[in-house]
Amino acid sequence: MNSLESKEHLDTKAILTLLVLTLMWGLNFSLIRYVNQGVSPVFASALRSLVASICGVTYCLRKGERLFHTDIRLFHGVIVGLLFGVEFACIYFGMLYTDAARSVVFVYLSPFVVAVGAHLFLKGDRLTFLKTLGLIIAFAGIVVVFQGRPGTAKPTMIIGDLLEITAAILWGATTLYIKRFMADKVEPIHTFLYQLVFSIPILFLVSLILEPVWIVRIDGSILAALFYQSVLIAFISYLFWFKLIHQYAVSRLSAFTFFTPVFGVLSGVLFLGEEFTVSLMVGLPMVSVGIFVVNWRKKTAFE
């Protein structure tokens, strides 16, 4: 395959793509919480990976792409799938205990993991003063959110918060692993497919252990939400995300995903009636400013 050199700065096409993706991902957190009312969370995540994998296999067959490699690349694919599976088990299970608005903010701690990891382990993706300043501002915004709980919060909310933070660390580690070991060796569709296929047994195993009942209620709206999560999010949006990872510096891509908490909080407030706390009002603008600073340079970020 042709190896693509990572672009240091995001062009207009990348920025517009990221805005659409983050809008979709932000809404998805509310839909996860909604689906949890009828389907156990980890089982729902396993179903999502299964449906998205079928879509990915169909895509490969139609394009004449091979499904799996037979060398070290397959091993890397298994590792990515394991990380992804545990990550989403944490996300879905954690949302039994905490709000969607808070979950989406905590999961997007992942850019800090990526920024530091890229500086340490990836060539040409270094922390600069502005990147560091932007990440600090955004991190401070997340701390503000963490400290201000809604009035209806239960003591168990911290369990959900910690699970979402664990998911953030795993997401960051997955992004770094892909960029280090797979980005210039496999096509984006294979990165996508490995991640989903090898996460399925992990998710089903976790579901078997933790969830005695898988389905409580199924109706049209829950099925529609599962379709959104499986086809639009897990298949289409992730395929575009992996294409971006293969082409651009991951520290800038990950920093830009801080927009997802903005959309996620708004969807939680609008569609689930979650409390828009003072901490969210203060923390979200700080996160947005941090994104701008990370991606700013003297010429323009929209080359």
Image: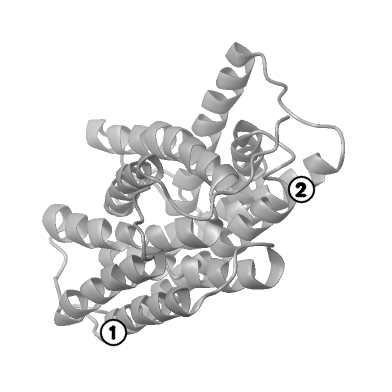
- Between residue 104 and residue 252, name the one nearer to us: 252
Disc 1 designates what residue? 144
Q: Give me the disc on residue 78.
A: none
**Residue 235, horizontal then vertical, whole percent:** 47, 34
Furthest residue toward front? 299
Residue sitting at x 75%, y 30%: 68
Q: Secondary structure at mark 1?
A: helix
Dot 2: within a 10 Å radius of its alpha carbon, few (fewer than 14), some, or many (20 or more) residues?
some
The amino acid beneath tag 2 is His
Dot 1: within a 10 Å radius of its alpha carbon, few (fewer than 14), some, or many (20 or more) residues?
some
Residue sitting at x 19%, y 79%: 282
Displayed quadrant of residue 237: top left
Residue sitting at x 52%, y 25%: 55
Q: How far apart are labels 2 and 1 at the CA level?
A: 37 Å
- Between residue 180 and residue 53, name the one nearer to us: 180
In the image, 169: left or right of 143? right
